[in-house]
Amino acid sequence: MGKLDEVLALIKEGTRTAGEIAQRLNLSIEEVEGIIRILESLGYIEKIKMNSSCNTCPLKKICPGSCVVFKGNIYEVKRDDEK
């Protein structure tokens, strides 16, 4: 499993910040932020910025102000030998 896959899996499981992801995968925050930008450009995730609906969120006190969320489905191409 590559770094892109590992970061995407963590985001899909609910890990929301670059700091958390970096710590869990033993990567630098800069590297994770780069991976997040790639995943965002490919349409797998989207960055959610703090908005008015955040005022009622129970996590408001611990939220860093933005996070990333999984945005779709992941499909894999099956090879002939996997049918």
Image (spheres, grey):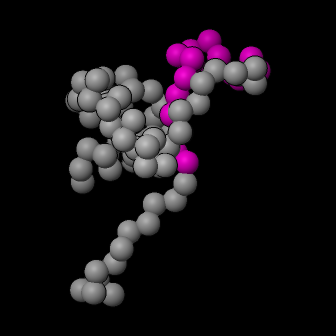
Q: Is residue 34 above or below residue 10?
A: above
Q: Quadrant of the N terminus?
A: bottom left
Q: Is residue 22 left or right of residue 57?
A: left
- Residue 62 lies in what quarter of the image? top right
Label tally: 0
Q: Is residue 18 above or below residue 69?
A: above
User: Can the viewer see residue 24 in this picture?
Assistant: no
Give the residue at the far top of this rendering: 61
- Residue 11 lies in what quarter of the image? top left
Residue drawn 36% across the image and 74% down it: 77
Q: Position of residue 21 (x, y in %)?
A: 36, 31
Residue drawn 55% across the image and 23% down it: 66
Q: Is residue 52 magenta?
A: no
- Residue 22 lies in what quarter of the image? top left
Residue drawn 26% across the image and 29% down it: 31
Q: Position of residue 65 (x, y in %)?
A: 57, 17
Q: Is residue 60 magenta?
A: yes
Q: Quadrant of the C terminus?
A: bottom left
Residue drawn 52% across the image and 28% down it: 67
Q: Position of residue 39 (x, y in %)?
A: 40, 44
User: Can the viewer see residue 26 in this picture?
Assistant: yes
Give the residue at the far front of this rendering: 41
Q: Is residue 38 above or below residue 64?
A: below
Q: Is residue 6 left or right of residue 74?
A: left
Q: Which residues are magenta?
A: 55-71
Q: Position of residue 44 (x, y in %)?
A: 47, 49
Q: Is residue 63 above or below residue 80?
A: above
